[in-house]
Amino acid sequence: PDGEQLYLTEDRPDGRFYRFTPETYPDLTAGTLAVAQVANSGAVTWLEVPDPGAATTPTREQVPESTAFDGGEGVWYDQGAVFFSSKGDNQVRRYDTEAETMAVVYEGTGELEGVDNLTLEPGTQDLFVAEDGGNMEVVLVTPDGEAFPFLRIVDEGVPAGGLESEVAGPAFSPDGRHLYFSSQRGGPANRGVTYVVSGPFRAADAAAGATTTTAATMV
């Protein structure tokens, strides 16, 4: 909403990171689609995709000099920064929309595995990242790139057909007091279930002068 642009990931092994600039925001019926080229320094150049509606040539193949990201997943904007995950290399990145630079904020080694959907706690730079499979956790990633398990869904079992579940759709209420998330194949008859965890979270703790946080386990 600040830059009147949209950012998109692409869930492919050679997926790209895109930016769409509408001609008349917030009307999305017409505009320019660009793809990111990231230099070794982290500087980002946006290159226009020549034919976004092509039926035979995928957008990711139209600009060969653009940068590939292995399995783009969750993406979230907050205060001039776009965070997104890529499951193939298990990393979370931050794009600075003003400086037009990109950096890795989680290197892919630690408590967080199977990076997927993500969200940011309002008023902080704390990321909450959902895991696709694995041990079914929502993991807190600090601005320093440290990862701490926040909650884990246990005893969910493997649904019929052998497909594993995944944690999906983490999102905070506007006041930051409640964190919502879902288990894609959990709940009765493995049809999916949505949970809510009520705070206070770190922002409220800091405002109150507290020094501890509380973890939750969903059973």
Image: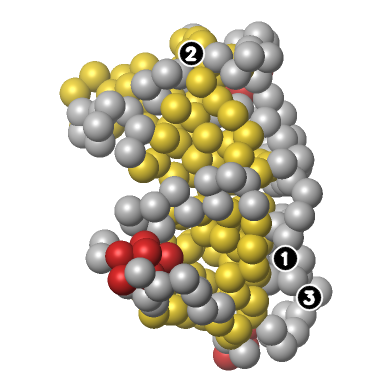
Q: CA distance from mark 1 to mark 2?
A: 33 Å
Tell me whether the residue at label 2 lies in contact with that at label 3, contact meaning CB atoms closer than 8 angstroms.
no
Among the two numbered marks 2 and 3 on one chain, the one whose residue lies closer to the N terminus: 2
Which one is in front, 163 or 200?
200
Q: Are marks 1 and 2 in contact (CB under 8 Å)?
A: no
Q: Which residue is mark 2?
A: 46
- Kind of residue at badge 2: Trp
Residue 75 location (% of width, % of height)? 49, 44
Q: In the picture, which quadrant includes the C terminus?
A: bottom right
Q: Secondary structure at mark 1?
A: loop
Query: How is this picture coloured?
Result: secondary structure
Q: Which mark is residue 175?
A: none
- Return the disc, 3 or 1, that comes first in the chain's sequence: 1
Residue at the spot 70% in from the left edge and 57% down from the top edge: 112
Q: CA distance from mark 2 to mark 3?
A: 42 Å
Q: Is residue 194 above or below residue 2?
A: below
Q: Residues within 10 Å of mark 2 (few under 14, many from 20)?
A: some
Q: Is residue 185 above or below residue 52?
A: below
> Counting other residues with Cα less than 10 Å from the Cα at mark 1, is it few (<14), some (14-19), or many (20 or more)?
some
Q: Residue at x 64, y 76 (%)?
A: 152
Secondary structure beneath dot 2 equals strand
Which residue is labeled 3 in the image?
161
Q: Which residue is mark 1?
A: 133
Residue 116 or residue 78, whichever sits in front:
78
Q: Can you give x and y, in whole percent of width and height, for residue 66 in the image?
A: 62, 15
Q: Quadrant of residue 153?
A: bottom right
